[in-house]
């Protein structure tokens, strides 16, 4: 339904989008995630006809939207911006603006505004001056204002970036309900990968001006397509190495340490190994050997850093591996800096990505 | 010292008793400057909007020029208009010199730059997210303009007030093209608050001057009060 065909955007010398290719399906929630400054806002603004691409095409329902910029296309879409901004009038009038632009009748406007207020849980706020609302309430007004025109596509540019946690949860809940109940296609950008994971059916990871990966949250989080994506989605342990054959199984040599990998890889390939910290086990060095086939790497504890009710234990096995374990377990194992331990993990827990 | 105190007392009496001369001068001042401000608004607001939303070569230089003209000396404007409408000037045949109309023209031209410039500032003051939101909501060009103006209405109102303040308080142009005439009919007289103060002071009528000065200040104060009240709504 929204097709991105090599979308490019350049501001003076700076290339922000460098040929974005992707497809957003009708009725899905698609989250554009990526670090700050990766061009998420720019991409959404191009889709909402607020900016013009330097190259490539954006198609909505097959039509190139920038070819013949028409009000009709603009009016298919609603957008909520990062910064909560309301018109200097009442809440009800704020929500009514889009309907007035479309020449709706007064009675219809009143009814729809009332419905929209109810949807965002601001019933009774209609006569309040919008400027007196809190940031979270303003953002709900902005959402109601965008939704009252019943857009096919709802664009949200980091809508919760400036809000407190409770308001964030409210907005997220609304987005899910709007998508589920009204079937609106939602394109949301966020630098918060967990928000992307919570909301989206599919994620696009925007990096260096292109989608480094597009997939379901599960795919992106467990099978990142590149080292950068792995780093961005919060995989703590990324180890570079070279593939070597080992008795028929696949292994990777990382600076002299062998790591067994389940996936078939061609010997000689340069790869990065991504290992989630929750898949690592830390045991005393003299404990029973790990089951055959498992990776069991000896090492010494390099650091123990508290993190909420857990501790992040980093072990030097020739390369650093860190795991997050409970305080009690740290005490039980009598772990301290310099302790000799064994770090074990299954070959299946290792996700290898090719390096350039 | 005594004369000054006496002047203030006499001034109070002139105001309280609604002295016909003082009232006539005050009303004339307001009418002339208000007319000039309204005329200037009709030009400055659309012009400012056109410059703000426009994209044309030399736009930045034009804005710079307008800002330079903020401090256009009032006597220079007076002289310019004088030359244009004096007997020997190109518009001399219209016989406008030393008429209230001439004063309106001069004051209109005087406040045009500052009102145009402040209109541009007022529109720049609208949050860019508001602009994006309007476009995103599918505004036509006209709807977009109307709503931006509405968002900037307080700043635009302040622009008008500042224009009026500059018009009613200037003396150079008023005296050059108006001539400070106190004729028998109200409409053909050109004596306004500022020119009257200037004249009465030079003639030693301190109390008249003080009375007119107080009224001038009161008008400025009233205009400011109106603006702050509206802005706080």
Image (tube, rainbow, N blue to C red):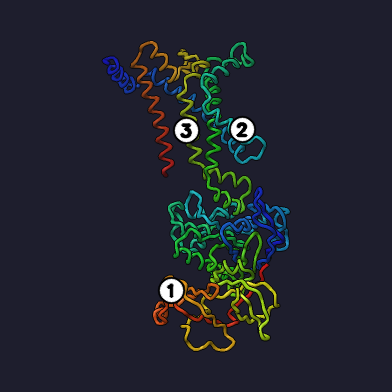
The residue that mark 2 highlights is B62
Q: CA distance from mark 3 to mark 2?
A: 23 Å
Point out residue A148 in the picture as x, y percentages from the top left corner.
Answer: 56, 60
- Residue position marked by numbered label 3 in the rendering: B161
Which residue was labeled with disc 1? A337
**Whole-Å distance between the Cαs marked 1 and 2?**
69 Å
Q: Are marks 1 and 2 on the same chain?
A: no
Q: Residue at x 59, y 55 (%)?
A: A104
Q: Residues within 10 Å of mark 2 (few under 14, many from 20)?
A: few
Category of crowding for the residue at label 3, using alpha-carbon neighbours closer than 10 angstroms: few (below 14), some (14–19), many (at least 20) = many
Residue A16 x %, y %: 64, 55
Residue A155 quadrant: bottom right
Residue A331 percent coordinates (x, y): 39, 79
Q: Chain of mark 2?
A: B
Picture disc at residue A144: none
Q: Nearer the viewer, residue A19 or A2?
A: A19
Name the one closer to the observer, A36 or B207: A36
Circle 3 marks a residue in which chain?
B
User: Which callout, 3 or 2, points at the residue further toward the start of the chain?
Assistant: 2
Q: Nearer the viewer, mark 3 or mark 1?
A: 1
Image quadrant containing the N terminus of chain A: bottom right
- Which chain does the residue under circle 1 lie in? A
Q: Are marks 1 and 2 in contact (CB under 8 Å)?
A: no
Could you say which is closer to the camera, residue A41 or residue B122? A41
């Amino acid at each position: 339904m929204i097709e991105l065909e090599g979308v490019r955007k350049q501001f003076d010398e700076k290339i922000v989008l460098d040929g974005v290719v992707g497809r957003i399906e009708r009725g899905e929630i698609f989250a554009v995630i990526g670090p700050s400054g990766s061009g998420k806002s720019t991409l959404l603004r191009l889709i909402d006809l607020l900016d013009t691409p330097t190259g490539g095409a954006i198609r909505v329902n097959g039509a190139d939207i920038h070819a013949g910029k028409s009000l009709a296309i603009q009016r298919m879409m609603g957008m909520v911006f990062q910064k909560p901004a309301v018109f200097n009038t009442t809440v009800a009038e704020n929500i009514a603006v889009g309907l007035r632009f479309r020449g709706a009748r007064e009675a219809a406007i009143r009814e729809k505004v009332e419905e929209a207020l109810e949807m965002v849980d601001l019933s009774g706020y209609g006569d309040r001056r919008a400027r007196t609302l809190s940031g979270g309430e303003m953002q709900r007004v902005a959402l109601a204002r965008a939704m009252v025109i019943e857009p096919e596509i709802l664009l949200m540019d980091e809508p919760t970036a400036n809000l407190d946690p409770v308001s964030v949860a409210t907005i997220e809940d609304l987005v899910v309900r709007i998508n589920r109940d009204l079937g609106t296609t939602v394109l949301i950008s966020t630098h918060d990968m967990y928000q992307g994971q919570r909301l989206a059916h599919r994620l696009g990871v925007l990096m260096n001006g292109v989608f480094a990966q597009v997939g379901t949250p599960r795919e992106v989080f467990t099978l990142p397509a590149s080292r950068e994506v792995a780093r961005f989605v919060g995989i703590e342990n990324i180890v570079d190495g070279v593939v070597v054959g080992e008795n028929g199984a696949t292994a990777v040599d990382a600076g002299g340490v062998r790591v067994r990998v389940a996936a078939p890889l061609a010997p000689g390939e340069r790869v990065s190994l991504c290992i989630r910290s929750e898949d690592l086990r830390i045991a005393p060095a003299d404990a029973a050997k790990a089951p055959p086939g498992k990776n069991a790497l000896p090492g010494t504890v390099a650091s123990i850093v508290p993190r909420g009710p857990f501790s992040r234990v980093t072990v030097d096995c020739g390369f650093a591996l860190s795991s997050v374990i409970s305080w009690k377990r740290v005490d039980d194992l009598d772990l301290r800096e310099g302790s000799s331990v064994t770090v074990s993990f299954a070959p299946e827990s290792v996700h290898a990505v090719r390096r350039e | 010292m005594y004369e000054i105190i006496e002047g203030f007392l006499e001034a109070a009496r002139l105001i309280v008793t609604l002295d016909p001369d003082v009232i006539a001068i005050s009303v004339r001042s307001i009418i002339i400057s208000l007319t000039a401000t309204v005329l200037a608004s009709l030009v400055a607001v659309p012009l400012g909007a056109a410059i703000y939303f426009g994209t044309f070569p030399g736009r930045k230089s034009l804005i710079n020029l307008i800002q330079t003209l903020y401090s256009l000396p009032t006597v220079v404007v007076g002289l310019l208009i004088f030359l244009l409408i004096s007997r020997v000037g190109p518009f001399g045949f219209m016989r406008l010199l030393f008429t209230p109309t001439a004063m309106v023209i001069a004051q209109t031209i005087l406040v045009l730059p500052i009102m145009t410039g402040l209109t541009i500032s007022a529109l720049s003051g609208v949050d860019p997210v508001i602009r994006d939101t309007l476009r995103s909501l599918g505004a036509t060009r006209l709807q977009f303009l109307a709503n931006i103006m509405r968002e900037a209405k307080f700043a635009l109102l302040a622009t008008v007030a500042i224009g009026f303040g500059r018009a009613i308080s200037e003396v150079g142009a008023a005296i050059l093209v108006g001539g400070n005439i106190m004729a028998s009919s109200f409409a053909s007289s050109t004596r306004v608050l500022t020119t009257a103060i200037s004249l009465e002071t030079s003639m030693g009528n301190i109390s008249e001057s003080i009375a007119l000065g107080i009224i001038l200040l009161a008008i400025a104060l009233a205009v400011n009060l109106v603006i702050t009240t509206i802005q706080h709504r």
